[in-house]
Image: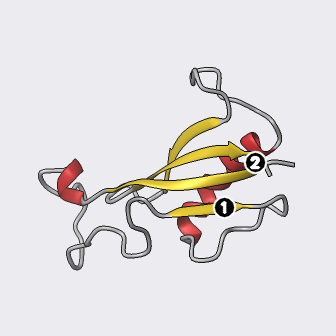
Amino acid sequence: MPKVKLTVLKVMDQKDIFKKSPVKQSKPLPPCHIHHEGQEFIVGPDLNMPEGFCHWAWSTAKTPVKILMFGGNYPWQEEPGVSVTCCTDGLRPVIYKVERIEA
């Protein structure tokens, strides 16, 4: 069974997205402190969240991981076995490339 690689493409700051935050915040939120650009994670056939990966990000990343792990592709992607996803933090998301790799 193939493995899946997650690569951090971009760690966004609120200022990259909004001129002014759309919600009132108790304190300013910095960019994600868990991930940095270029960081890579491998998901094995057990489909467990990789060590050091953000739990919130995993809640959305695991869907494309499963699709690619089991041989699926995204029809709007010309390259098979590849997708891009992001975490659920709408104020400062982290964007990941998801790639099927041979074991």
Q: What residue is pinned by disc 2?
A: 66
- Pick whichever of labels 1 and 2 is earlier in the sequence: 1
Could you classify mark 1 by the number of other residues whose Cα lies within 10 Å: few (under 14), some (14-19), or many (20 or more)? some
- Place of residue 17 in the rendered image (x, y in percent of width and height, measured from the top left): 23, 49
The kind of residue tagged 2 is Lys
- Place of residue 75 in the rendered image (x, y in percent of width and height, measured from the top left): 64, 21
Q: Distance between the residues labelled 1 and 2?
A: 13 Å
Secondary structure of residue under mark 1: strand
Could you classify mark 2 by the number of other residues whose Cα lies within 10 Å: few (under 14), some (14-19), or many (20 or more)? some
- At x 39%, y 66%, the residue is 36
- At x 51%, y 54%, the residue is 7
Q: What residue is pinned by disc 1?
A: 42
Vertical placement of residue 18 versus 46, above or below: above
Vertical placement of residue 24 versus 8, above or below: below
The kind of residue tagged 1 is Ile
Q: Which of 41 and 90 is in front in this view?
A: 41
- Place of residue 64 in the rendered image (x, y in percent of width and height, measured from the top left): 66, 44
| Residue 65 placement, left or right of 82 | right
| Residue at the far right in the pictured view | 1
Residue 18 got which mark? none
Colouring scheme applied when the structure was drawn: secondary structure
